[in-house]
Amino acid sequence: MPQVTVFVPAPLRACSGGAAELRLEAPTVRAVLEDLERRHPGLYRSVCDETGAVRRHVNLFVNELHMRERDGLDTALVPGDKLTILPAVSGG
Amino acid sequence: MLIVGAGGIGSPVARILVDAGVRGIAVADDDVVALENLHRQVLFDDRDLGRRKVDVLAERLPVEAIPVRVDRRNGRSLLRGRACVIDGTDSFADKYLLNDLCLELSVPFVHAGAAQFRGQVLLVRPGGPCLRCLLPEPPDARTDECRVTGIFGPAAGLVAALAAGEALRAISGDPAPSALLLADLATGRLQRARLPPDPLCPCAAGAPAGR
């Protein structure tokens, strides 16, 4: 399975043991989230709602493309892909 | 050009744009300088505590001070006809308001936001993806309002520089497509990402205002 990197934003790092990056093996974005649900349930709940959908104030990018520009949760991943979790920011 | 919010993003944006030779800049804000602002609002110092931010800026830069909070009542008249509007606000409600009014008035809009060590900038042009394409609805109370989590000073400065650059692109007519610019100073990671229009976003129908 392809090894990919998940970038965890600072506000959610308390849910990833402080890690800014997680390396895991997963063939799709959905599989990444399933892995997070098992290993980092708090992080998963911050990204997905109770139905498993990505929360509307969170965006997921695969490399530089938003996942809705690919195949959403079914987006296939290849080795070296980078998945960025982007929660909202409002400060100024 | 109008900068809405004279804080950690808006005030450095004003400085950068003035130094770039831009004139006809107005800055709108009704807030006053507070001690907790000073680490990131580098145009102010402790002699300015308690003074209106826009008044201090207008003393130090050739900008027009508009000492009001932009809201639904005054927004259209303040934004109409501007070459560009830059978001230096610190609430989701204000960011949505500026996004929606700029789309309605066909004014280029530079959204900017920062929290903790990170920030983001998006140039919104008429017909292109907008803030609601990125964020259809505001998050719940757990998320990072700057008053709750704070902003690392350099993160605000970096986001301001990126926002000023996008504003200059907008007024110079640069046709390059908009991208979402992301910065995380906790890891030193800068990223450029493509934001596709959300087919469910009201901006796709050209009528986002009034939400």
Image (cartoon, helix red, strand yellow):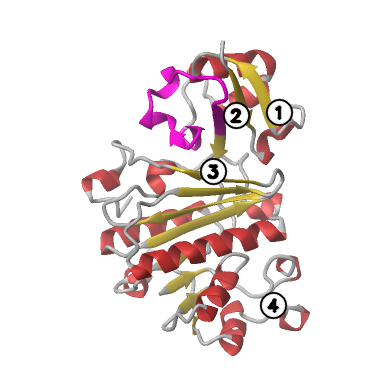
- For the N terminus of chain B, which image quadrant? bottom left
Q: What secondary structure is marked by label 2?
A: helix
Q: Mark 1 vs mark 3: tell me if same chain.
A: yes
Quadrant hosting residue B82: bottom left
Spatial CA distance of label 2 from label 1 is 9 Å
- The first of marks 2 and 1 along the sequence is 1
Q: Mark 2 vs mark 3: tell me if same chain.
A: yes
Residue A88 numbered tag: 3
- In magenta, the rendered stretch is A56-84
Q: Can residue A31 be seen in this view?
A: yes
CB contact under 8 Å: marks 2 and 1? yes
Given the image, on which type of amino acid does mark 3 rest? Ala
Instruction: Give the residue at mark 1.
Output: A15
Instruction: Give the residue at mark 2.
Output: A46
CB contact under 8 Å: marks 2 and 3? no
Spatial CA distance of label 2 from label 3 is 12 Å
Percent position (x, y) of residue B43?
A: 66, 77
Q: Could you classify mark 1 by the number of other residues whose Cα lies within 10 Å: few (under 14), some (14-19), or many (20 or more)?
A: some
- Chain containing mark 4: B
Q: Could you classify mark 4 by the number of other residues whose Cα lies within 10 Å: few (under 14), some (14-19), or many (20 or more)?
A: many
Spatial CA distance of label 4 from label 1 is 36 Å
Spatial CA distance of label 1 from label 3 is 17 Å
